[in-house]
Amino acid sequence: LNEHGAAQEQLNNLRDSYAKLLGHQNLKQKIKHVVKLKDENSNLKSEVLKLRAQLTKRKQSEAKLQEELNKVLGIKHFDPSK
């Protein structure tokens, strides 16, 4: 989470710098647009992290259920340590 906070702060600094560097007739509108895009990008990155965590949990759950099913069916996995 600390990395995420540092990345978010860096993103905010880059967003502000980028918005200042843009030259456009309607500068305020362009800045608002860029800020909106950066915020949307940040939100999407957060959503990706959340979905990856959910996927990992589901894969672990699936593996556990498969193992239980194999026990019930009497299917044994090869264990190289034995």
Image (cartoon, rainbow, N blue to C red):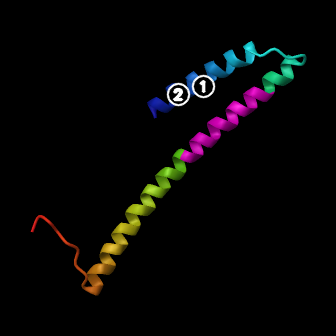
Residue that appears at 74% across and 18% down: 19
| Quadrant hosting residue 80 | bottom left
| Farthest residue, direction right | 25
- What's the magenta region? 33-48
Residue 50, given in percent of the width and then of the height, sits at: 53, 48
Residue 28, given in percent of the width and then of the height, sits at: 85, 19
Asked whether, in this view, residue 43 is left or right of residue 76, the answer is right
Residue 1, given in percent of the width and then of the height, sits at: 46, 35
Between the residue at mark 1 and the residue at mark 2, the CA separation in whole angstroms equals 6 Å
The residue identified by callout 2 is 7
Residue that appears at 58% across and 40% down: 45
| Farthest residue, direction bottom | 73
Within 10 Å of disc 1 (Cα), the crowding (few <14, some 14-19, many 20+) is: some
**Residues at marks 1 and 2 touching, judged by CB atoms closer than 8 Å:** yes
Disc 2 is placed on an element classified as helix
Camera-nearest residue between 46 and 17? 17
| Quadrant hosting residue 27 | top right
Residue 56, given in percent of the width and then of the height, sits at: 43, 56
The residue identified by callout 1 is 11
Above or below, comparing residue 42 to residue 12 in the picture? below
Residue that appears at 79% across and 29% down: 33
Q: Amino acid at mark 1?
A: Leu
| Quadrant hosting residue 76 | bottom left
Camera-nearest residue between 71 and 80? 80
Q: Main secondary structure of the magenta part?
A: helix
Residue that appears at 59% across and 46% down: 47
Looking at the rendered structure, the number of numbered marks drawn on it comes to: 2
Within 10 Å of disc 2 (Cα), the crowding (few <14, some 14-19, many 20+) is: few
Disc 1 is placed on an element classified as helix
Asked if residue 21 is among those painted magenta in the image, a careful observer would answer no
